[in-house]
Amino acid sequence: MQSVFSITSSGPGLYEFTDEARAFVRKSGTGGGLLTLFVQHTSCSIVIQENADPDVRRDLAEFFRRLAPHADQPSMGWIRHRTEGPDDMPAHLKAAVLPTSLSIPIVDGKLALGTWQGIYLFEHRDEPQTRRVVAHISS
Amino acid sequence: MQSVFSITSSGPGLYEFTDEARAFVRKSGTGGGLLTLFVQHTSCSIVIQENADPDVRRDLAEFFRRLAPHADQPSMGWIRHRTEGPDDMPAHLKAAVLPTSLSIPIVDGKLALGTWQGIYLFEHRDEPQTRRVVAHISS
Amino acid sequence: MQSVFSITSSGPGLYEFTDEARAFVRKSGTGGGLLTLFVQHTSCSIVIQENADPDVRRDLAEFFRRLAPHADQPSMGWIRHRTEGPDDMPAHLKAAVLPTSLSIPIVDGKLALGTWQGIYLFEHRDEPQTRRVVAHISS
């Protein structure tokens, strides 16, 4: 069973879609199986992270902003791919370090997430985007 | 077929559980399939790494300690999430960079690991923990 | 259904094998399913990245060269695992940060890659290598 989630973003950061994933699993009627999520872009990611303190998401975005700063920063003078703006190549770098696909077991009809785990689209571009995540359930 | 591995850790570093994974695959009687491992936490990871020289694991832990130092280090003054101790937010950062889920093909009834590959829980917290890894076999 | 792709590399960088993956999916006759790719090594990775501007791949390789420099560089004096040359431990570090396995949904008989997504072996060693990627299709 397959579906596509459409997620809109407005700048770098984490956008939760745990509820959409849970609803898809419920609707599928799967008892035991595996949900795989795959993002069809090379400048955003999908991550599982803490869903309690919002500061965790803020610190995550800040860490990756420091790990791969915009191409107009002095430390990034070596970047060649600059045609799509200073946030573009760093977005590809973050997309390489963070997951493009994730798989979560379904146990007793429910996603086997830990207590503090939420599922997020991690946007790396500055401008608003509409992102596609393909969801697949295997038995 | 599904199972849960319980892995205890005592500080940052890599804890091998290749044997548990192999035993689960053997017990399942699967000829050809896919083993997916999923860790139910946001402050540890699962990785596949070299199982020969222990210095490789030591260097890996050291690299990540330097990539995301404790929050009480001068370079980490920008961190906001500090309520659970100086090792907590860096643990979330490492958990974002390293895998939460991994999938390994099963070929002729055996995990298709390369000669030097072992499966490890990568602990990022300082205090001892008991970690849960959910294992799922798809056909 | 399973297969093994053999990919030869000649130094650090990204080697595309999207066509091999598509051909395997086509040959399998799968309508809807999931392709999982798993690399049997701990010093190279598999990534999905932009397949348009070659500068993106060049910048990616350069970013990781800077993130984990060779062990004979001054900033890497802390590395202990040195028996296989100055490019070896940094290759393991990159292999930890980048994916060992990836899963891509198959929709209507085709890999559900986004417009700009290609599948690459990311080589981290300096010397030429022959790498094995195990491919598995689940329903």
Image (cartoon, coloured by chain):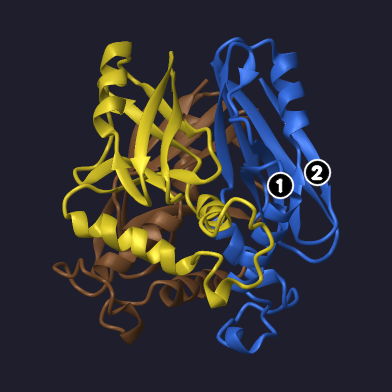
Chain colours: A yellow, B brown, C blue
Left or right: C87 with respect to A7?
right
Left or right: C71 with respect to B3?
right
All told, the count of numbered labels is 2
Between C79 and A123, the one lying in front of the other is A123
Q: Chain of mark 2?
A: C
Q: Which residue lies under the disc numbered 2?
A: C7
Left or right: C101 with respect to B86?
right
Residue B1 visible in the picture = no
* C68 versus A88 height, above or below: below
Q: Residues within 10 Å of mark 1 (few under 14, many from 20)?
A: many
Residue B76 visible in the picture = yes
Q: Residues within 10 Å of mark 2 (few under 14, many from 20)?
A: some
Q: Which residue lies under the disc numbered 1?
A: C121
Precedes in sequence: disc 2 or disc 1: 2
Residue at image location 30% in from the left, 16% down from the top: A31
Residue at image location 33% in from the left, 12% down from the top: A28
Residue at image location 58% in from the left, 66% down from the top: C93
Image coordinates of residue C51 in percent, x first then y, are: 70, 41
Image coordinates of residue B78 in percent, x first then y, are: 28, 75
Amino acid bearing label 1: Leu
